[in-house]
Image: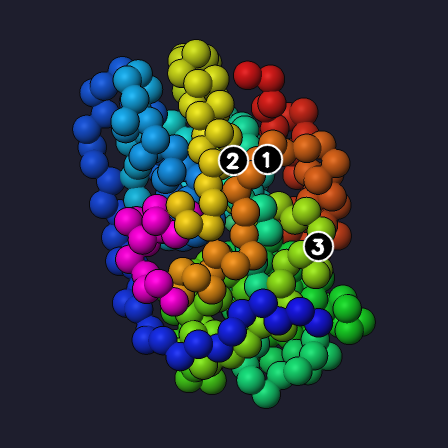
Amino acid sequence: MKRKFSAAAVSLITAFSAVSCGSSKNDNANTVKIAYLPITHSLAVLEEAQQLEKQSGLKVELVKYGSWTELTDALNSNRVDGASVLIELAMKSKQEGIGIKAVALGHRDGNVIIVSNDISSAADLKGKTFAIPHRQSSHNILLNDALATAGLTIEDVNVTELAPTEMPSALASGQIDGYCVAEPFGAMGVSIGAGKVLFSSEELWEDSLCCGLVLTDKFINDRPDDAKSFVENYKSAGNSLTKESAKKVAKKYLNQSDEVLDISLQCISYNDLDITEETYNTLVEKVKEYGLSDNPPTYSEFVKNDF
Ligand code: ZN
């Protein structure tokens, strides 16, 4: 089994503030207001905002949130034009009648299953406590996939929902035995010596989906030319991100150490962010199989590729 993270001893960085600090100014007609969490999974939209800042025309106004719940509330009530968000959360909103479309992936790969140092296989997870950020997440799916490698199911573990910022310290204190969450919080658990990588996402689920770039129907319908330009610039920003430039933009927005970012960025990429029907349908199957939703939106209902 691959072990992509090294257990470099670095200090635990103060977690990001769980406070929404979005600006309310949105007077500029050329501005697209995008919600994000300060995680490596949202670097493509952060990079796009930087690139467009230097050009005339469309601008991205970034609105930072401290939790998926706050971010989803803003997206679902049209307080922002779009968001980089867990795709399962957006699918659930769509299923409940919210007018949104997924227009691209947030990233490719980039998740890990972190476990305490005394756990050496998926079978050892039986009876243990495992944290995920939200039931509607690829982290929940990856936990199910990991358990399946040992013939176990979600019924064999105690699953708890925790804020990502709390997971590394919860593992260190023994409150939980493992977790799966967006980066850099997996890397932080490794860097403080609290645990190790049991699986990386690509070992469990090839071409896994996790975060999506989602736009509101209101924005797409009211400003179709801006929506098209925004999505095109987003994809090219993703394609332009190298390990070096990703680290640079992460340093600016994420308030994490070099060591944590280096570990976090080892197995994530931002190129080719189209959502294909094949990968989406695999996600839909997993969402149904693992009980996240009985009736997720179909590709044609939820994904928009025709800008
Ligand atoms: Zn993600």
Identify the mark at residue 220; answer none if there is no mark: none
Q: Residues within 10 Å of mark 3 (few under 14, many from 20)?
A: some
Judged from the image, the secondary structure of the residue bearing numbered disc 3 is loop
Residue annotated with mark 3: 205
Residue 104 falls in image quadrant? top right
Q: Which residues are magenta?
A: 246-259
| Amino acid bearing label 1 | Asp
Evaluate whether residue 108 shows in this view.
yes
In the picture of the structure, the residue carrying the numbered disc 1 is: 272
- Kindly indicate whether the residue at mark 1 contacts the one at mark 2 (C-beta within 8 angstroms): yes
Residue at numbered disc 2: 239
Give the percent coordinates (x, y) of residue 306. Answer: 60, 17
Q: Mark 3 and mark 1: span between their CA atoms?
A: 18 Å
Left or right: residue 128 compared with residue 238:
right
| Amino acid type for the residue under numbered disc 2 | Asn
Q: Is residue 104 above or below residue 221?
A: below
